[in-house]
Image (tube, rainbow, N blue to C red):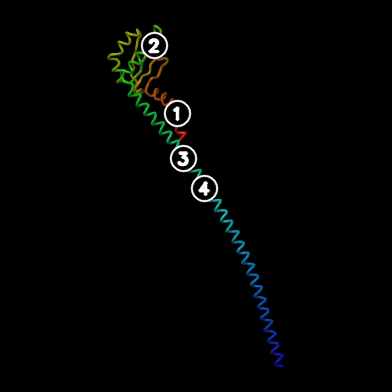
Amino acid sequence: MAQEIKDLIDRIQQEGVMAAENQAARIKTEAESLAQKIVAEAKKQAEKIIEQANSEAKKLDDSTNASLKQAGRDLLISLRKEINSMLDRLVKLNIHQSLTIEELTRIIRDLIKNAPLSSDSQIVISLPQQDKEKIEKGFLKQLAEEVKKQVILKSSDEIDSGFIISFDSGKSTFDFSDQALAEYISGSLRPELNKFLKSE
């Protein structure tokens, strides 16, 4: 009887151990399967994060490159404007320095002498007040006698140097003011300057 009880206990223990081992094996298998799922999901998430990061980095890189290109274009436009403005100032300054009273009187004399004037032509010359006064003192009377025409000098606050001349009492004019000459000269030089700036 004692042997039967002992056998029964041994058998119960063996069944318990086997059940526990089976349970442990099942838990281990489930744990391994779950771990594999977690690792696979983590890999997927990591790949998604890396892909998003790469996409964001590319967008940022593209945006940075576009911003740099735009900044370069803006700088070049600004530089062109500044150089063109400097060119205008330099041309105007040189014209202003070149248009002395002597030069003005020579140009005006040559223009009037070579103009096809009718007998009733009235010549009107507009120039800065200080130049008008200087020309009136010596040149005007001599010029009127030379060309046998009426020459009228007018002062103009809109002209810094140079003059505007009309051969038909002001109906039409030829502009030789520093502003008009500067625009003409700068306009001639600007395409060459822009070509040079483009090639750099």
Amino acid carrying label 2: it is Asn
Q: Secondary structure at mark 4?
A: helix
Q: Position of residue 166 (x, y in %)?
A: 39, 15
Q: Residues at badges 1 and 3 in contact (C-beta under 8 Å)?
A: no
User: Which residue is label 2 attached to?
Assistant: 114
- Give above or below for 143 relative to 69: above
Q: Residue at x 68, y 83 (%)?
A: 14
Give percent across and percent down for residue 9: 68, 87
Viewer-side label of 1, 3: 1
Q: Amino acid at mark 1?
A: Glu
**Nearer the N terminus, badge 2 or badge 3?**
3
Classify 130 as above or below 32: above
Earlier residue among tags 2 and 4: 4
Residue, far bottom: 1
In this figure, which residue is indicated by the disc labeled 1? 192
Residue 92 percent coordinates (x, y): 36, 26
Mark number for residue 72? 3
